[in-house]
Image (tube, helix red, strand yellow):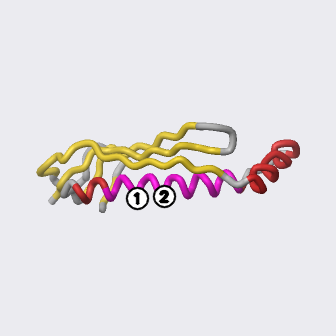
């Protein structure tokens, strides 16, 4: 599946628009990682547990968006965007969305 954040594919023609596709997930870290992040908050530096959580959430959300596009018969996604929000302390929601298209 080809995925771009732009609205067009240079050198390719969009021959059909399949519509909105999306994928999302809500992830949280276990208490041990949360305690470690609290200490890191005191001394500064990267909160690697949360970085890992967000990376995993992005991968899952994009994967689900691709599954949605595949089910609609698309071979590409244009105008892809990511959105994140905090649900509760120690958790995040990640949503990937875009427009499923057929290109040639």
Query: Label 2 belongs to which residue?
Result: 59
* Residue in view at x 18 percent, y 47 percent: 18
- Residue 46, given in percent of the width and then of the height, sits at 74, 51
Pointer 1 with pointer 2, Cβ within 8 A: yes
- Asked if residue 103 is positioned above or below residue 44 in the image, the reply reads below
Q: In the displayed orientation, state which residue is furthest to the bottom.
A: 1
Q: Residues within 10 Å of mark 2 (few under 14, many from 20)?
A: some
Query: Label 1 belongs to which residue?
Result: 63
Q: Quadrant of the N terminus?
A: bottom left
Q: Quadrant of the C terminus?
A: bottom left
Which type of secondary structure does the marked residue at label 1 adopt? helix
* Residue in view at x 32 percent, y 58 percent: 67
- Residue 92, given in percent of the width and then of the height, sits at 58, 43
Report the magenta residues as a range. 49-67
Q: Is residue 11 visible?
A: no
* Residue in view at x 13 percent, y 49 percent: 16
Taking the image as shown, residue 57 lies to the left or right of residue 73, namely right
């Amino acid at each position: 599946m080809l995925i771009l954040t732009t609205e067009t594919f240079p050198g390719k023609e969009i021959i059909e628009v399949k519509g909105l596709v999306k994928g999302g997930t809500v992830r949280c870290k276990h208490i041990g990682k949360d305690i470690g992040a609290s200490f890191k908050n005191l001394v500064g530096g990267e909160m690697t547990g949360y970085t890992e959580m967000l990376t995993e959430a992005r991968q899952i959300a994009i994967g689900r968006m691709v599954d949605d596009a595949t089910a609609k018969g698309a071979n590409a996604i244009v105008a892809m965007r990511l959105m994140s929000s905090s649900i509760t302390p120690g958790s995040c929601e990640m949503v990937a969305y875009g427009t499923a298209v057929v290109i040639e």
